Image (spheres, rainbow, N blue to C red):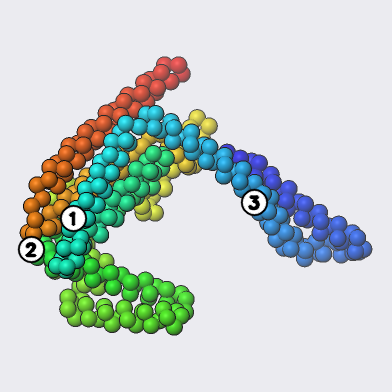
Amino acid sequence: MRGAEYSQRARDSLENALMAEFTVAFESDVPEDRMVEWMKERTPAAAENAVSALADSLLEECDVVAAGHMEQLAESVEGIHEFWGHALDMFWLVADQCLELGQWFNEQENCKAEADQDELFLALRNTTTRACRTAMEVHYLLCAGFGDAAQSRARTLYELAVVASVIDSSPDPHCTASRFLEHSDWESQQEYRSWAEVFELSEEEAAAARGIDASVENLLAKYGKAYASPWGWAAHLVTGKPTLRALERLTDLADGRPLYRAICHSVHAGSTGAQRVVEWSPEGYYLAYGPVDRLPIDAAIVAMFALTDVVRHLIRSRRDSRETQEENTWFAAIELLLTRAAEEFASRCDQLDAAIDAAHLKASADG
Protein backbone atom coordinates (compact mmCIF):
# COMPACT_ATOMS: atom_id res chain seq x y z
CA MET A 1 0.00 0.00 0.00
CA ARG A 2 1.22 3.53 -0.77
CA GLY A 3 -0.96 5.53 1.60
CA ALA A 4 1.96 7.29 3.30
CA GLU A 5 3.43 8.30 -0.07
CA TYR A 6 0.14 9.71 -1.35
CA SER A 7 -0.47 11.57 1.91
CA GLN A 8 2.96 13.20 1.62
CA ARG A 9 2.31 14.14 -1.99
CA ALA A 10 -0.96 15.79 -1.02
CA ARG A 11 0.85 17.73 1.70
CA ASP A 12 3.62 18.76 -0.71
CA SER A 13 1.07 19.83 -3.31
CA LEU A 14 -0.69 22.10 -0.82
CA GLU A 15 2.58 23.55 0.47
CA ASN A 16 3.75 24.25 -3.08
CA ALA A 17 0.48 26.00 -3.91
CA LEU A 18 0.69 28.15 -0.77
CA MET A 19 4.30 28.97 -1.51
CA ALA A 20 3.31 30.04 -5.02
CA GLU A 21 0.72 32.41 -3.54
CA PHE A 22 3.30 33.75 -1.09
CA THR A 23 5.69 34.37 -3.98
CA VAL A 24 3.00 36.32 -5.82
CA ALA A 25 2.37 38.39 -2.69
CA PHE A 26 6.09 39.09 -2.28
CA GLU A 27 6.55 40.07 -5.93
CA SER A 28 3.44 42.27 -5.73
CA ASP A 29 4.91 44.17 -2.78
CA VAL A 30 2.04 43.29 -0.46
CA PRO A 31 2.71 45.18 2.81
CA GLU A 32 3.98 43.03 5.66
CA ASP A 33 1.07 44.01 7.92
CA ARG A 34 -1.33 42.82 5.16
CA MET A 35 0.47 39.55 4.40
CA VAL A 36 -1.44 37.30 6.85
CA GLU A 37 -4.82 38.62 5.73
CA TRP A 38 -3.80 38.39 2.07
CA MET A 39 -2.71 34.75 2.46
CA LYS A 40 -5.99 33.87 4.21
CA GLU A 41 -7.88 35.32 1.26
CA ARG A 42 -5.76 33.35 -1.21
CA THR A 43 -5.82 30.03 0.68
CA PRO A 44 -9.04 28.71 -1.00
CA ALA A 45 -7.54 29.35 -4.45
CA ALA A 46 -4.28 27.72 -3.36
CA ALA A 47 -6.15 24.66 -2.12
CA GLU A 48 -7.97 24.41 -5.45
CA ASN A 49 -4.67 24.64 -7.33
CA ALA A 50 -3.18 21.98 -5.05
CA VAL A 51 -6.06 19.62 -5.81
CA SER A 52 -5.68 20.17 -9.56
CA ALA A 53 -1.92 19.68 -9.44
CA LEU A 54 -2.20 16.47 -7.41
CA ALA A 55 -4.89 15.09 -9.73
CA ASP A 56 -2.71 15.87 -12.76
CA SER A 57 0.30 14.12 -11.24
CA LEU A 58 -1.79 11.07 -10.39
CA LEU A 59 -3.22 11.00 -13.90
CA GLU A 60 0.30 10.90 -15.32
CA GLU A 61 0.79 7.60 -13.45
CA CYS A 62 -2.51 6.11 -14.58
CA ASP A 63 -1.07 3.59 -17.04
CA VAL A 64 1.70 2.50 -14.67
CA VAL A 65 -0.65 2.04 -11.71
CA ALA A 66 -3.20 0.17 -13.84
CA ALA A 67 -0.48 -2.08 -15.26
CA GLY A 68 0.68 -2.89 -11.75
CA HIS A 69 -2.87 -3.75 -10.74
CA MET A 70 -3.33 -6.02 -13.74
CA GLU A 71 -0.03 -7.76 -12.97
CA GLN A 72 -1.14 -8.30 -9.37
CA LEU A 73 -4.51 -9.58 -10.56
CA ALA A 74 -2.84 -12.01 -12.97
CA GLU A 75 -0.67 -13.38 -10.16
CA SER A 76 -3.73 -13.74 -7.97
CA VAL A 77 -5.68 -15.57 -10.68
CA GLU A 78 -2.73 -17.95 -11.15
CA GLY A 79 -2.56 -18.65 -7.43
CA ILE A 80 -6.30 -19.19 -7.14
CA HIS A 81 -6.36 -21.57 -10.09
CA GLU A 82 -3.45 -23.53 -8.67
CA PHE A 83 -5.59 -24.52 -5.67
CA TRP A 84 -9.19 -24.18 -6.87
CA GLY A 85 -8.59 -24.81 -10.57
CA HIS A 86 -10.25 -28.20 -11.05
CA ALA A 87 -13.32 -27.18 -9.03
CA LEU A 88 -13.63 -23.93 -10.99
CA ASP A 89 -13.16 -25.80 -14.26
CA MET A 90 -15.96 -28.17 -13.31
CA PHE A 91 -18.17 -25.18 -12.47
CA TRP A 92 -17.44 -23.80 -15.93
CA LEU A 93 -18.28 -27.14 -17.53
CA VAL A 94 -21.67 -27.19 -15.79
CA ALA A 95 -22.40 -23.61 -16.89
CA ASP A 96 -21.19 -24.25 -20.44
CA GLN A 97 -23.33 -27.39 -20.78
CA CYS A 98 -26.37 -25.51 -19.49
CA LEU A 99 -25.74 -22.82 -22.10
CA GLU A 100 -25.29 -25.41 -24.87
CA LEU A 101 -28.46 -27.25 -23.90
CA GLY A 102 -30.45 -24.03 -23.60
CA GLN A 103 -29.18 -22.79 -26.95
CA TRP A 104 -29.90 -26.14 -28.62
CA PHE A 105 -33.41 -26.23 -27.22
CA ASN A 106 -34.02 -22.66 -28.34
CA GLU A 107 -32.85 -23.45 -31.87
CA GLN A 108 -35.25 -26.40 -32.03
CA GLU A 109 -38.27 -24.65 -30.57
CA ASN A 110 -38.01 -20.89 -31.03
CA CYS A 111 -39.73 -20.55 -34.41
CA LYS A 112 -42.59 -22.88 -33.48
CA ALA A 113 -42.99 -21.22 -30.09
CA GLU A 114 -43.12 -17.77 -31.69
CA ALA A 115 -45.76 -19.01 -34.12
CA ASP A 116 -47.74 -20.58 -31.26
CA GLN A 117 -47.35 -17.37 -29.21
CA ASP A 118 -46.07 -19.60 -26.44
CA GLU A 119 -45.48 -17.12 -23.60
CA LEU A 120 -44.28 -19.90 -21.31
CA PHE A 121 -41.40 -20.80 -23.61
CA LEU A 122 -40.52 -17.14 -24.22
CA ALA A 123 -40.48 -16.27 -20.53
CA LEU A 124 -38.34 -19.27 -19.61
CA ARG A 125 -36.03 -18.79 -22.59
CA ASN A 126 -35.38 -15.19 -21.53
CA THR A 127 -34.83 -16.24 -17.92
CA THR A 128 -32.46 -19.02 -18.99
CA THR A 129 -30.44 -16.63 -21.16
CA ARG A 130 -29.95 -14.28 -18.25
CA ALA A 131 -29.18 -17.17 -15.90
CA CYS A 132 -26.43 -18.51 -18.19
CA ARG A 133 -24.84 -15.08 -18.49
CA THR A 134 -25.03 -14.54 -14.74
CA ALA A 135 -23.46 -17.93 -14.02
CA MET A 136 -20.53 -17.02 -16.23
CA GLU A 137 -20.13 -13.77 -14.31
CA VAL A 138 -20.02 -15.76 -11.06
CA HIS A 139 -17.33 -18.02 -12.54
CA TYR A 140 -15.17 -15.15 -13.75
CA LEU A 141 -15.44 -13.34 -10.42
CA LEU A 142 -14.48 -16.48 -8.50
CA CYS A 143 -11.51 -17.09 -10.80
CA ALA A 144 -10.34 -13.53 -10.09
CA GLY A 145 -10.79 -13.96 -6.35
CA PHE A 146 -13.71 -11.56 -5.92
CA GLY A 147 -15.88 -13.80 -3.76
CA ASP A 148 -18.26 -11.15 -2.43
CA ALA A 149 -19.06 -9.97 -5.94
CA ALA A 150 -19.60 -13.59 -7.00
CA GLN A 151 -22.04 -14.04 -4.13
CA SER A 152 -24.04 -11.01 -5.24
CA ARG A 153 -24.45 -12.45 -8.74
CA ALA A 154 -25.26 -15.90 -7.31
CA ARG A 155 -28.09 -14.21 -5.40
CA THR A 156 -29.54 -13.02 -8.71
CA LEU A 157 -29.29 -16.56 -10.06
CA TYR A 158 -31.21 -17.91 -7.07
CA GLU A 159 -33.99 -15.38 -7.70
CA LEU A 160 -34.08 -16.36 -11.37
CA ALA A 161 -34.53 -19.97 -10.31
CA VAL A 162 -37.45 -18.97 -8.09
CA VAL A 163 -39.01 -17.06 -10.99
CA ALA A 164 -38.65 -19.97 -13.41
CA SER A 165 -40.05 -22.44 -10.89
CA VAL A 166 -43.05 -20.25 -10.00
CA ILE A 167 -43.93 -19.69 -13.65
CA ASP A 168 -43.59 -23.34 -14.68
CA SER A 169 -45.30 -24.86 -11.64
CA SER A 170 -48.24 -22.45 -11.42
CA PRO A 171 -51.79 -23.75 -12.10
CA ASP A 172 -51.80 -21.97 -15.46
CA PRO A 173 -48.15 -21.58 -16.54
CA HIS A 174 -49.00 -19.78 -19.78
CA CYS A 175 -51.09 -17.16 -17.94
CA THR A 176 -48.37 -16.61 -15.33
CA ALA A 177 -45.71 -16.36 -18.06
CA SER A 178 -47.79 -13.74 -19.86
CA ARG A 179 -48.14 -11.73 -16.65
CA PHE A 180 -44.38 -11.98 -16.15
CA LEU A 181 -43.53 -10.76 -19.66
CA GLU A 182 -45.99 -7.87 -19.49
CA HIS A 183 -44.65 -6.79 -16.09
CA SER A 184 -41.74 -5.15 -17.91
CA ASP A 185 -44.04 -2.19 -18.63
CA TRP A 186 -44.62 -1.53 -14.92
CA GLU A 187 -40.87 -1.75 -14.28
CA SER A 188 -40.24 0.72 -17.12
CA GLN A 189 -42.85 3.07 -15.65
CA GLN A 190 -40.97 3.14 -12.33
CA GLU A 191 -37.74 3.99 -14.16
CA TYR A 192 -39.34 6.89 -16.04
CA ARG A 193 -40.90 8.23 -12.86
CA SER A 194 -37.56 8.09 -11.03
CA TRP A 195 -35.88 10.02 -13.82
CA ALA A 196 -38.71 12.57 -13.92
CA GLU A 197 -38.28 13.24 -10.20
CA VAL A 198 -34.71 14.42 -10.79
CA PHE A 199 -34.43 15.46 -14.45
CA GLU A 200 -36.70 17.06 -17.01
CA LEU A 201 -37.65 14.48 -19.62
CA SER A 202 -37.23 15.31 -23.30
CA GLU A 203 -40.32 15.44 -25.49
CA GLU A 204 -39.47 12.00 -26.85
CA GLU A 205 -38.98 10.58 -23.36
CA ALA A 206 -42.16 12.20 -22.07
CA ALA A 207 -44.12 10.71 -24.97
CA ALA A 208 -42.67 7.28 -24.25
CA ALA A 209 -43.54 7.68 -20.56
CA ARG A 210 -47.15 8.53 -21.44
CA GLY A 211 -47.34 5.41 -23.60
CA ILE A 212 -46.02 3.29 -20.75
CA ASP A 213 -48.49 4.87 -18.33
CA ALA A 214 -51.37 3.96 -20.63
CA SER A 215 -50.12 0.39 -20.95
CA VAL A 216 -49.75 0.01 -17.17
CA GLU A 217 -53.25 1.41 -16.64
CA ASN A 218 -54.60 -1.32 -18.92
CA LEU A 219 -52.56 -3.97 -17.11
CA LEU A 220 -53.88 -2.87 -13.72
CA ALA A 221 -57.42 -2.98 -15.06
CA LYS A 222 -56.71 -6.48 -16.32
CA TYR A 223 -54.79 -7.91 -13.35
CA GLY A 224 -55.66 -5.69 -10.37
CA LYS A 225 -53.76 -3.20 -8.23
CA ALA A 226 -51.53 -5.86 -6.65
CA TYR A 227 -49.83 -6.18 -10.05
CA ALA A 228 -48.14 -2.82 -9.40
CA SER A 229 -45.28 -4.10 -7.25
CA PRO A 230 -41.85 -5.70 -7.87
CA TRP A 231 -43.26 -9.23 -7.69
CA GLY A 232 -46.78 -8.26 -8.72
CA TRP A 233 -46.80 -10.50 -11.78
CA ALA A 234 -47.27 -13.41 -9.33
CA ALA A 235 -49.84 -11.68 -7.11
CA HIS A 236 -52.58 -14.08 -8.22
CA LEU A 237 -50.63 -17.01 -6.75
CA VAL A 238 -50.17 -15.78 -3.17
CA THR A 239 -52.26 -14.50 -0.31
CA GLY A 240 -51.23 -11.04 0.78
CA LYS A 241 -48.35 -9.01 -0.62
CA PRO A 242 -46.33 -10.81 -3.31
CA THR A 243 -42.71 -11.05 -2.17
CA LEU A 244 -39.75 -13.24 -3.05
CA ARG A 245 -40.27 -15.14 0.22
CA ALA A 246 -43.92 -15.77 -0.64
CA LEU A 247 -42.97 -16.99 -4.11
CA GLU A 248 -40.19 -19.13 -2.72
CA ARG A 249 -42.74 -21.06 -0.64
CA LEU A 250 -44.48 -22.05 -3.89
CA THR A 251 -41.36 -23.86 -5.11
CA ASP A 252 -39.08 -26.70 -4.05
CA LEU A 253 -36.29 -24.16 -3.47
CA ALA A 254 -37.27 -23.14 0.07
CA ASP A 255 -34.41 -25.21 1.52
CA GLY A 256 -32.03 -22.81 -0.17
CA ARG A 257 -33.19 -19.89 1.97
CA PRO A 258 -30.29 -20.16 4.51
CA LEU A 259 -27.72 -19.93 1.72
CA TYR A 260 -29.67 -17.11 0.09
CA ARG A 261 -29.68 -15.17 3.36
CA ALA A 262 -25.93 -15.71 3.75
CA ILE A 263 -25.02 -14.40 0.30
CA CYS A 264 -27.33 -11.39 0.71
CA HIS A 265 -24.68 -9.82 2.96
CA SER A 266 -22.59 -9.29 -0.17
CA VAL A 267 -25.39 -7.27 -1.74
CA HIS A 268 -26.88 -5.08 0.98
CA ALA A 269 -25.12 -2.27 2.83
CA GLY A 270 -25.50 -3.92 6.21
CA SER A 271 -23.18 -4.31 9.18
CA THR A 272 -22.16 -7.92 8.46
CA GLY A 273 -21.08 -7.20 4.90
CA ALA A 274 -19.13 -4.12 6.01
CA GLN A 275 -17.29 -6.00 8.74
CA ARG A 276 -16.16 -8.70 6.33
CA VAL A 277 -13.78 -6.34 4.56
CA VAL A 278 -11.90 -5.30 7.72
CA GLU A 279 -9.43 -8.00 8.71
CA TRP A 280 -6.92 -8.44 11.50
CA SER A 281 -3.21 -9.01 11.20
CA PRO A 282 -0.40 -8.82 13.76
CA GLU A 283 0.17 -5.24 12.63
CA GLY A 284 -3.46 -4.32 13.35
CA TYR A 285 -6.74 -4.10 11.44
CA TYR A 286 -6.61 -3.28 7.75
CA LEU A 287 -8.99 -2.88 4.81
CA ALA A 288 -9.17 -6.13 2.84
CA TYR A 289 -9.50 -5.21 -0.82
CA GLY A 290 -8.96 -6.93 -4.13
CA PRO A 291 -8.64 -10.68 -4.75
CA VAL A 292 -8.63 -13.20 -1.91
CA ASP A 293 -7.56 -16.83 -2.00
CA ARG A 294 -10.31 -18.20 0.25
CA LEU A 295 -13.34 -18.40 -2.00
CA PRO A 296 -16.89 -18.51 -0.64
CA ILE A 297 -17.94 -21.78 -2.24
CA ASP A 298 -21.58 -21.06 -1.47
CA ALA A 299 -21.52 -18.69 -4.46
CA ALA A 300 -20.49 -21.53 -6.76
CA ILE A 301 -22.92 -24.02 -5.22
CA VAL A 302 -25.91 -21.65 -5.36
CA ALA A 303 -25.02 -20.60 -8.91
CA MET A 304 -24.74 -24.13 -10.26
CA PHE A 305 -27.89 -25.44 -8.60
CA ALA A 306 -29.91 -22.36 -9.57
CA LEU A 307 -28.73 -22.41 -13.19
CA THR A 308 -29.53 -26.09 -13.70
CA ASP A 309 -32.94 -25.58 -12.14
CA VAL A 310 -33.73 -22.77 -14.58
CA VAL A 311 -32.66 -24.93 -17.54
CA ARG A 312 -34.77 -27.81 -16.23
CA HIS A 313 -37.87 -25.64 -16.45
CA LEU A 314 -36.95 -24.44 -19.94
CA ILE A 315 -36.77 -27.94 -21.42
CA ARG A 316 -40.11 -28.74 -19.77
CA SER A 317 -41.77 -25.72 -21.36
CA ARG A 318 -42.63 -27.43 -24.66
CA ARG A 319 -43.56 -30.80 -23.14
CA ASP A 320 -47.05 -30.61 -24.61
CA SER A 321 -45.78 -30.29 -28.20
CA ARG A 322 -42.77 -32.60 -28.44
CA GLU A 323 -40.83 -35.45 -26.88
CA THR A 324 -37.74 -34.28 -25.02
CA GLN A 325 -36.06 -37.60 -24.22
CA GLU A 326 -32.68 -36.61 -25.63
CA GLU A 327 -32.73 -33.30 -23.75
CA ASN A 328 -33.75 -35.12 -20.56
CA THR A 329 -30.79 -37.50 -20.91
CA TRP A 330 -28.46 -34.57 -21.58
CA PHE A 331 -29.84 -32.70 -18.57
CA ALA A 332 -29.42 -35.74 -16.30
CA ALA A 333 -25.75 -35.83 -17.26
CA ILE A 334 -25.44 -32.14 -16.36
CA GLU A 335 -27.01 -32.84 -12.97
CA LEU A 336 -24.42 -35.55 -12.36
CA LEU A 337 -21.65 -33.12 -13.32
CA LEU A 338 -23.15 -30.62 -10.88
CA THR A 339 -23.03 -33.16 -8.04
CA ARG A 340 -19.40 -33.98 -8.76
CA ALA A 341 -18.47 -30.29 -9.01
CA ALA A 342 -20.10 -29.57 -5.64
CA GLU A 343 -18.16 -32.47 -4.12
CA GLU A 344 -14.92 -31.11 -5.56
CA PHE A 345 -15.55 -27.66 -4.07
CA ALA A 346 -16.32 -29.24 -0.69
CA SER A 347 -13.14 -31.32 -0.84
CA ARG A 348 -11.01 -28.30 -1.70
CA CYS A 349 -12.60 -26.34 1.13
CA ASP A 350 -11.85 -29.15 3.62
CA GLN A 351 -8.22 -29.19 2.50
CA LEU A 352 -7.94 -25.43 2.94
CA ASP A 353 -9.49 -25.57 6.41
CA ALA A 354 -7.04 -28.30 7.41
CA ALA A 355 -4.10 -26.25 6.14
CA ILE A 356 -5.28 -23.17 8.04
CA ASP A 357 -5.73 -25.16 11.25
CA ALA A 358 -2.24 -26.61 10.87
CA ALA A 359 -0.79 -23.14 10.34
CA HIS A 360 -2.53 -21.84 13.48
CA LEU A 361 -1.22 -24.77 15.54
CA LYS A 362 2.32 -24.17 14.27
CA ALA A 363 2.06 -20.45 15.03
CA SER A 364 0.84 -21.21 18.56
CA ALA A 365 3.67 -23.70 19.11
CA ASP A 366 6.29 -21.27 17.78
CA GLY A 367 4.81 -18.44 19.85
In-image side of 283 versus 59 (left or right): left
Secondary structure found at label 1: helix
Residue 265 visible within the image: no
Type of the residue with mark 1:
Gln
Badge 2 crowding class, 10 Å Cα cut-off, few under 14, some 14 to 19, many 20 or more, is few
- For disc 1, the marked residue is 108
In-image side of 88 versus 11 (left or right): left
* Mark closer to the chain start, 2 or 3: 3
Type of the residue with mark 3:
Leu
Quadrant where the image shows the N terminus:
top right
Q: Where, by quadrant of the figure, is residue 92 drawn? A: top left
Asked if residue 145 is positioned above or below residue 172 in the image, the reply reads above
Q: Which residue is nearer to you in this view: 50 or 147?
A: 147
* Mark closer to the chain start, 1 or 2: 1
The label on residue 59 is: 3
* Mark closer to the chain start, 1 or 3: 3
The label on residue 171 is: 2
Q: Residue at x 24, y 52 (%)?
A: 103
Question: Horizontal and vertical percent for residue 18?
Answer: 78, 56
Secondary structure found at label 3: helix
Q: Residue at x 70, y 48 (%)?
A: 11
Q: Which residue is nearer to you in this view: 324 or 11?
A: 324
Q: Which residue is nearer to you in this view: 77 or 244?
A: 77
In-image side of 146 versus 237 (left or right): right
Q: Spatial distance from mark 2 to mark 3, Cα to Cα?
A: 60 Å
